[in-house]
Amino acid sequence: MAALKFLMADTVAIIGPQTSGMAHVLSHLANEVHVPLLSFTALDPTLTPLQYPYFVQTAPSDQFQMTAIADMISYYGWREVVAIFSDDDPGRNGVTILGDKLAERRCKLSYKAVLPPDTTATPSFINSQLVKIKSMESRIIVLHTFAKTGLLVFDLAQKQEMMAKGYVWIATTWLSTVLDSVPLPSNTSNSILGVLTLRPHTPQSLKKQAFISRWKHLSNGSIGLNPYGLYAYDSVWTIAQALKLFFDQKGRVSFSNKNLTSKGKENLDLGALSVFDGGKQLLDNILRINMTGLTGPIQFGSDRSPPHPSYEIINVIATGFRSIGYWSNYSGLSVITPEKLQLKPANRSISNQHLKPVIWPGNTIEMPRGWVFPNNGRQLRIGVPNRVSYRAIVSQINASSAVQGYCIEIFRAAIKLLPYAVHYKFVLFGDGKNNPSYYDLVNMINLDVM
């Protein structure tokens, strides 16, 4: 409603809205009245210039962070992924892009867990989805939602023992925004240990450092500054520079009343709205902007995306969080900042993709395999002869169910080389006084009595 009031008050440009769902609605009106609509948080990949020519995303579209996540999953050699997302436009469309990007890398989404919108997601519903996921094979989980729901998911996942060794959690930029903005309670911090998240990367500069210093002074340290705050600041300056150029071009702010009607299914009375006569000229000026802001170079390509979108990859640890590398659409995964790599020829070869070591859930540096047999599945049973001779090859340990020996060590080494976890148990056969018969073992297997 606030945006509609602005459009009815002879407005020439709008910064916003905050959500992609609202951007879809307002962009139709912006098209009709020729008012540029700039948003640094409505990053749904389907908000394209073909359908919404007056809508401009001043921060990287979610298409790029989904590409970054797909590259991360491929880098670690995982093949199946579970996505948990909110049932709204950015959630659905973001996960659709993720599925496409994974397919390009011969990976796939094995399950999609849909949550109600942020304000209506209940603990009981989230819990039911987590129970389903826990019974599945994949242990790679991408969480694409908003802060309130996302933190609740992690809290409930910890109670379900799904933040333990073997699991991988990748959160989209909502989590890094929370980490940058407000201190978290200790119980919340504990529930996200080992999680990976993406943060929009903005190059270091004197201008950026000076602004951060001013922000700390103005806010009195009450709230941190996340990258989207920097994109907000640059969005204001983008409009200011475009308007300056507009007036330098002798442009005039004038409006024409037209009998506008809705082209959608719902009939809207748009008679109170006026068309900004200079809207196309101002939009062209915005799209031709070429300057340096707090977030780095500000300009727009044919897809109206900031040049060389990139992300920092964050690992949440006990003392806070640490950077393990970067992703950019120019160079892929690297431990070197994207702006340095842009000075060299692009190299997306597999051998040139690097990230620093990760502390995974369960406080381990051992990379999870990403896949296990479900808890309700049958274990692989290994028949072990309880021999009298050749005990160095295989033998029982002190009349227990444990076994040891050369063959046992070879088997365990081979299991470790598999790209997924295998639940197994050793089953002794024979009385330990006589070497057991191989034919007896085969007969026991056929009778399924082992």
Image (cartoon, helix red, strand yellow):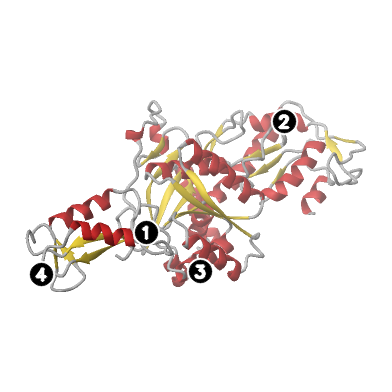
266 or 437, which lies in front?
Answer: 437
Residue, x 85% and y 44% (percent of image)? Answer: 265
Query: Type of residue at label 4?
Result: Lys
324 or 86, which lies in front?
Answer: 86
The residue beneath circle 4 is: 433
Question: In the figure, is residue 75 to the left or right of 218?
Answer: left
Residue 274 in picture, x, y percent from top left? 87, 39
Distance Cα–Cα, label 4 vs label 1: 41 Å
Earlier in the chain: of badge 2 and badge 4, it is 2
The answer to whether the residues at label 4 and label 1 have Cβ atoms under 8 Å apart is no
Residue, x 51% and y 65% (percent of image)? Answer: 131
Query: Type of residue at label 1?
Result: Gly
Query: Type of residue at label 2?
Result: Phe
Question: In the figure, is residue 288 to the left or right of 22?
Answer: left
Query: Type of residue at label 3?
Result: Leu
Residue 156 image label: 3
Under tag 2, what secondary structure? helix
Question: In the figure, is residue 207 to the left or right of 280?
Answer: left
Q: Residues within 10 Å of mark 3 (few under 14, many from 20)?
A: some
The answer to whether the residues at label 3 and label 2 have Cβ atoms under 8 Å apart is no
Give residue 334's quadrant in the image. top left
The residue beneath circle 2 is: 246
